[in-house]
Amino acid sequence: MAGHSKFKNIQFRKGAQDKKRAKLFSKLAREITTAAKMGLPDPAMNPRLRTAIQAARAQNMPNDNIDRAIKKSQEAGGDNFEEVRYEGFGVAGVGVIVEALTDNRNRTASEVRSIFAKHGGNLGETGAVSFNFDRLGAIAFDLDRATADAMLEAAIEAGGDDVETTDEGHVVYCNPDELHQVGKALEDRFGEARTMQILWRSKTDVPIDEEAGEKLLRMIDALEELDDVQQVYANFDVSDDVLQKLTAA
């Protein structure tokens, strides 16, 4: 029985990972289609599309999927998605920003509001949370592309504002309006970036314990499960040990 239970658990986890991967590809495809529809279907002439394709490749999304998503943008009568942002609070007053692409604002708002309420949070007005975040462009490179000093020097020359170097790599932050200008200058020097995106980075974080962390991560997971939700940001601070325990497979 022990071996059988272990096998079932592995299969369940594999199935869950496969399902999560399929959902991720669906979200990436939606962004690619939207970006191509809002501009030209050529990534060389459409910075947002190029960014979306880079994000997809960073997640090992097959080229066939990427090509289909671009072609879908040119189909007559295709879905039209609009960008919406929701702001609210999770447990312990943690600020949460939810970005979505939706073809039905009422449906998405209802689903997001329901998840906040179910997990002890509440949805707020636009601006209720985002004032405590900076909107930034972020260009990520693998660690072996440059030393920390070389990346910092290049970022300054390219017009970047800040650089974070960790064991996972280098991230150059810049004005979101200058993302592709800064990114191109860095790619000319270090090769193609791992990812290039516009994101929200918190100015101050709310320290939370394990119990609150578990509730918050459950809420974030539920939000990310929604088809319309593209990104979720939250300004919480929890110890590495607790975070590892909460996110263990």
Image: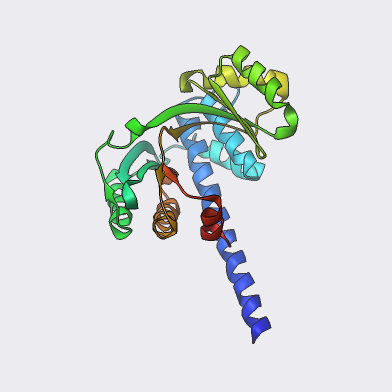
| Residue 206 in the figure: left or right of residue 5 | left
Residue 200: x and y in percent read 44, 34
Residue 137: x and y in percent read 51, 26
Instruction: Pick the quarter of the image with the C terminus.
Output: bottom right
Instruction: Pick the quarter of the image with the N terminus.
Output: bottom right
Question: Which of the colour schemes (rainbow, by chain, secondary structure, one colour) is used?
Answer: rainbow
Q: Is residue 175 above or below residue 201?
A: above
Q: Residue furthest bottom?
A: 1
Residue 184 visible somewhere in the drawing: yes
Residue 234 visible somewhere in the drawing: no
Q: Residue at x 47, y 49 (%)?
A: 238
| Residue 217 in the figure: left or right of residue 29 | left
Q: Residue furthest top?
A: 157
Residue 33: x and y in percent read 50, 37
| Residue 149 in the figure: left or right of residue 24 | right
Q: Residue at x 47, y 23 (%)?
A: 176
| Total numbered labels | 0
Q: Is residue 155 above or below residue 222?
A: above
Residue 7: x and y in percent read 66, 76
Q: Residue furthest right?
A: 144
Q: Residue at x 48, y 20 (%)?
A: 175
**75 or 154: nearer the eye?**
154
| Residue 158 in the figure: left or right of residue 213 | right
**178 or 47: nearer the eye?**
178
